[in-house]
Amino acid sequence: MKKNKYEIDMCNGTIMDKLISFSLPLMLSSILQLMFNAVDIIVVGRFSGSQALAAVGSTTALINIFTNLFIGISLGANVLAARYYAAGRDKEMSEAVHTAITLALISGILMAFVGFGAARGALGIMDTPGDVIGQATLYMRIYFLGMPFFMLYNYGAAILRAVGDTKRPLVFLAVAGMANVALDLLLVIVIPLGVAGVAVGTVTSQMISCILVLRCLHKSEGSYQIRFSRLTIKGVYLKRIFQVGIPAGIQSTVINFSNALLQSSVNSFGSTAMAGYTAANNILSFLYVSVNAVTQACMSFTSQNYSVGKQKRMDRVLLDCMVLSAGVAGVLGVGAYVFGSQILKIYTSEPDVIQCGLEILAITTVPYFLCGIMDLLPGALRGMGRSAVPMVLSVIGTVGIRILWVYVFFPQHRSLYFLFISYPGSWIVTIAMQAVCFIFVRKQCIRQLKTAGMLTA
């Protein structure tokens, strides 16, 4: 099955080394993608002050709400492409790829219009303070103009991940990330445009990564090669992408809605707490993308092995992913807890802002391995084409607990530390529900493979 040095044979041979080979470049790619926002935060925090820092940070939850539905749908494209690739169904693979890229372009344009128009109203709903909302609106509107580039890159990278190629997207993001750093420094320090400068830098870097991934797919020799003249949407593939992708996107969107509620609670403490949350949340984002890389590996490996009926290998993939995810989260989480003060000083030199950030990190970093395990079980189920039930359970467990916490318990104990206890609490409840769900759904999937005569091992 392996046709070039970038692809990984997920259905044969050892597993852990291939999971690492897949996850590590993806992890680094995700970290580089986060650096787009982190550089924005660091540059404006250092050179434009805490209000500009709060303005950029106050947009994060809202941007995620707008984008994560469509980013979640890209997981459907990943699962479908991985399944066709493993089964050697080249025609279906090609048509699914062209459908996914066309969908990415349309959804990117749609989000650009919606995000630009709704920016100020949405920030107002979140009770963004008056001394911040103007700059936050400007940043958000410019950022959303880059949505077509953002979506095309993410869908293109999802297709490459389906065949095990996580190395070339890493190179593309490294190039784009260096451009982003250079542009941020130019447009904030040399040409003092403030939040507008960092937004323009981010959009430009997204355009660069988009061009590189599309060029890669265009020049590919495999069944995932794209031809722009063949871009179209075929209903049969769109439906299959949506079956996995829409529940995943809704789950991500609703969870980020709960984060927006937390953002509103943080906003009630003022701009200093907002700046501290911005820095701490950015650190937590690095932890999240690290464990999410393992979840992506679990989904892709499970999807390919499910398509050829390898039950025992699917089970081994999940167990190895749990070990890998817990190890990564444990090292990074403890590191963020121990060196939290020093890391926060990268973002800001203001002691009050650092103290607010430390309150949040104190309760969220060490138990972060729970978040990794919580996401792995739905990832494995998505790889088997089952996405709706884990979505419902994640929404109930994660969002339900956080809403209860914000509106019932938090008003009685108003502190950032107490507010963010809702994170590990919601992870534990969701893991328990997802584990029960996984046992039942896995049995159903195995029965279906046996009935179809596809179960091989």
Image (cartoon, grey):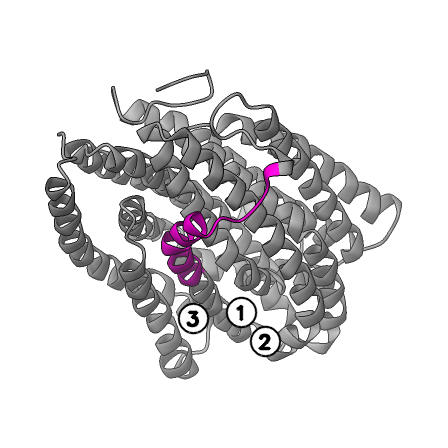
Q: Where is residue 108 in the image (x, y as percent from the top left)?
A: 62, 54
- Residue density around tag 2, few if under 14, some if 14–19, many if 20 or more, within 10 Å: many
Quadrant (top left, top right, bottom left, bottom right) of the N terminus: top left
3 or 2: mark nearer the eye? 2
Q: Mark 2 points at which residue?
A: 126
**Can I make out residue 332 in this image?**
no
Query: Residue 12 colored magenta?
Result: no
Measured Cα–Cα span from mark 3 to mark 1: 10 Å
The overriding secondary structure of the stretch rendered in magenta is helix
- Residue 241 counted in the magenta span: yes
Which residue lies at the image location 79% right of the left edge and 56% below the top edge?
196
**Local crowd at mark 3 within 10 Å, few (<14), some, or many (≥20)?**
many
Tell me residue 246's x, y (percent).
42, 58
Q: Is residue 126 left or right of residue 116?
A: left
Q: Quadrant of residue 20?
A: top left
For badge 1, the amino acid type reads Gln
Q: Quadrant of residue 209?
A: top right
Decide: is 391 above or below 336: below
Local secondary structure at mark 3: helix
Element marked by disc 2: loop
Give yes or no for contact between labels 1 and 2 (Cβ–Cβ under 8 Å): yes
Q: Could you say which disc has been placed on residue 263 in the image?
A: 1
Mark 1 crowdedness (10 Å alpha carbons): few <14, some 14-19, many ≥20: many
Q: Mark 3 points at which residue?
A: 419
Cα–Cα gap, marks 1 and 2: 8 Å
Farthest right residue in view: 191
Image quarter of the C terminus: top left
Provide the residue span drawn in magenta.
Answer: 230-252
Q: Do the residues labelled 3 and 1 touch (CB within 8 Å)?
A: no
